[in-house]
Structure formats: structure tokens, C-alpha cells
Image (spheres, rainbow, N blue to C red):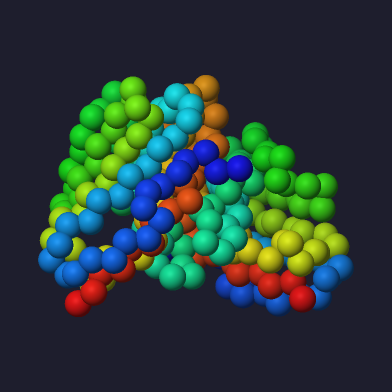
Amino acid sequence: DTGVSQNPRHKITKRGQNVTFRCDPISEHNRLYWYRQTLGQGPEFLTYFQNEAQLEKSRLLSDRFSAERPKGSFSTLEIQRTEQGDSAMYLCASSLGLAPQETQYFGPGTRLLVL
Amino acid sequence: SQQGEEDPQALSIQEGENATMNCSYKTSINNLQWYRQNSGRGLVHLILIRSNEREKHSGRLRVTLDTSKKSSSLLITASRAADTASYFCASLATGGYQKVTFGTGTKLQVIP
């Protein structure tokens, strides 16, 4: 059973550098979501794709953040000119995309530390 | 900002006892879900309750939903040390959107 996978699992970078994370959803899932979670808090929604279309974006997703899902399968989240405040766990989730109300299945996350 | 608030923030119980966590939300919802997160790991889906449901069971879990009070509770019966984790409620608002809003979480410690 292959669940949602994320790479890398950990990333340490210096302030000002760009980073890119990858998410591979469960193979038959059409919807893909990105969340950010800081220590001691619940995940916060960043963005959501239905196939390759990015349908919702949070105001948390500043212009330094960009997410893509070019072929409707895997997705990438890029952060440009990283800041220390970007340090967080970045979580990806996927769901079937067949019904309005669906369970989202989460990956293990990518933990980012910006020095 | 987080829509959901959970109560208590932390809970410590002995193995075998029951644990109850509460969640409040602010807007009309389609459904509410509960997730578990072990330290530094991804979230595991536990149970989903729809807005027209009042109670749902899954194994040792019981979830209730009171839409008039905009609140939900998660009861874990006969707790085990392996239940030690953070528990989050997550609500899906009405309106056809897919944005799920998570609460701040309850950190549960089950002492063997």
C-alpha cells in the first residue's frame, strides 16, 4: 500500500536560498493539498489542486511561494528567498476527488529549518 | 488564523482510562474530521462525521457533533500507551470549497 510520500523529509537551508519540496499523492487521487504546520499548532491550509488546476490558495501563500502540479500527479512547492519564519513542517495530503466531502490522507511531511 | 479551538490543550491519563477532547468551530460545516499525529510525524485520519450526523463510532473512538453549539467531542475509551499523540479536529466549511481548517490540537499522554 503506497500512501502519500514527500521528499525530502528534512531540509536545512540558509536564509535567502530557494527550496523545493515534492509530494507524490496516492495514485488514483485527483485532489492534492498543501499545509504548513508550526510547532504546537495545527496544520494551516496553503493550497489545493484538482488534477492540475490550482483551485484555492490561502493568503498565507505569499508571492515567494509557488506550487505546481503539472501533470495532475505529483506536486512541487517552492519557496523563494527563504526567511526564518518559513521554518515549519510542510504537509501534503491527497483525496479521491469524487465527492464534495472526502477524507484527506496525509504524507509524513517535510520539515524545513531556515538558518 | 485557526478556526478551531480544542480543549484541553494537554491531557494526561492512566492507561485504561477514557480520554475526552473537545473542539469548537466558528462557521457552518459540511463535515468534521479527527486526526491523530504522533510527535513530528504526519497526520492519521481517525473518523469523519457529517453535519447531519450526531454521533459516530469506530472501534474505541466515539465522536459527537452538536451543530447548534458548533462543537464536537472525541472520546477514546480504554486508552493505551500507544494512543499518546496530538489529536486535531478539522472542519470543512460549507460553500463547496475544499479548505479544511484544523484546530490547535490536544496533546494526549497515556501513562502505562
Please determine whether, in this image, residue A73 is positioned above or below residue B107: above
Residue A32 position within the rendered picture, expressed as x and y whole percent measured from the top left: 56, 46
Observer-nearest residue: A4 or B46? Answer: B46
Which residue is drawn at the image coordinates 71% and 40% (left, top)?
A: A59
Residue B78 in view here: yes
Count of numbered labels shown in the rendering: 0
Residue B92 drawn above or below residue A1: above
The answer to which of A41 and A21 lies nearer the viewer is A41
Q: Is residue B73 left or right of residue B44?
A: left
**In terms of image quadrants, where is residue A51?**
top right
Image coords of residue B18 (percent x, y): 17, 57
> Which quadrant of the rendered structure holds the N terminus of chain A?
bottom left
Q: Could you tell me residue A68's position as x and y percent?
A: 71, 49
Quick check: can you spot residue A29? no
Q: Which quadrant of the figure contains the C terminus of chain A?
A: bottom right
Q: Is residue A113 above or below residue B78?
A: below
Foreground: B63 or A52? B63
Residue A81 appears at what percent x and percent y?
Answer: 85, 62
The residue lying at 77 percent from left, 59 percent from top is A79
Q: Is residue B17 above or below residue A98?
A: below
Q: Is residue B55 left or right of residue B93?
A: left
